[in-house]
């Protein structure tokens, strides 16, 4: 099952993100969870990090929630909110509309 994990960062989270970035990356790399998509959300300036998004393929909601809770970013207070929502990939990994971009 696919789940979208949407995490919004606390307003003063840059120092937390920086302090725990290496642990966060190691957690993602070592995780048995099938991470389909992951990355930071950024402000309109394209630079300032304001949260994170993941799409994971896991057996159930409990596994998605456990994955989110185990992230060092979450464990160290980076996220103000974390929402876990079922996600349906109607595109099956292909461009949704129009021709594929190269």
Image (spheres, rainbow, N blue to C red):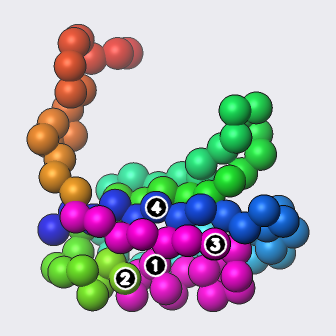
The disc at residue 68 is 1
Q: At x 15% / y 68%, what residue is drawn?
A: 1
Find residue 6 and name its label: 4
- State which quarter of the image contains the C terminus: top left
The relative height of residue 24 versus residue 2 in the rendered view (above or below) is below
Quarter where residue 36 is shown = bottom left
* Distance CA(mark 2)–CA(mark 4): 11 Å
User: Crowding near pointer 3: few (<14 within 10 Å), some, many (20+)?
Assistant: many
Q: Residue at x 23, y 26 (%)?
A: 95
- Residue 55: in magenta span: no
CA distance separating discs 3 and 2: 14 Å
Q: Which residue is mark 3?
A: 79
Which image quadrant for residue 9? bottom right
Residue situated in front as seen by the camera: 40 or 36 = 40
Under tag 2, what secondary structure?
helix
Residue 46 visible in the displayed image: yes
Q: Which tag, 4 or 1, sits closer to the chain's start?
A: 4
Q: CA distance from mark 3 to mark 4?
A: 10 Å
Residue contact at pointers 2 and 4, CB within 8 angstroms: no
Question: Which segment did they paint magenta?
Answer: 66-86
Binning the other alpha carbons within 10 Å of mark 4 as few (below 14), some (14 to 19) or many (20 upward) gives many
Q: Are marks 3 and 2 in contact (CB under 8 Å)?
A: no
Between 66 and 31, the one lying in front of the other is: 66
**Which comes before the other along the chain, label 2 or label 4?**
4
Q: Circle 2 is placed at which residue position?
A: 65
């Amino acid at each position: 099952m696919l789940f979208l994990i949407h995490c919004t960062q606390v307003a003063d989270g840059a120092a937390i993100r920086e302090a725990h970035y290496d642990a966060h990356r190691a957690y993602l790399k070592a995780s048995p969870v099938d991470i389909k998509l992951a990355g930071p959300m950024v402000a309109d300036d394209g630079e300032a990090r304001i949260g994170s998004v993941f799409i994971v393929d896991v057996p159930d909601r409990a596994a998605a929630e456990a994955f989110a809770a185990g992230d060092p970013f979450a464990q160290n207070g980076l996220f103000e909110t974390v929402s876990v929502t079922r996600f349906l990939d109607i595109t099956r990994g292909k461009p949704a509309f129009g021709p594929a971009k190269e």
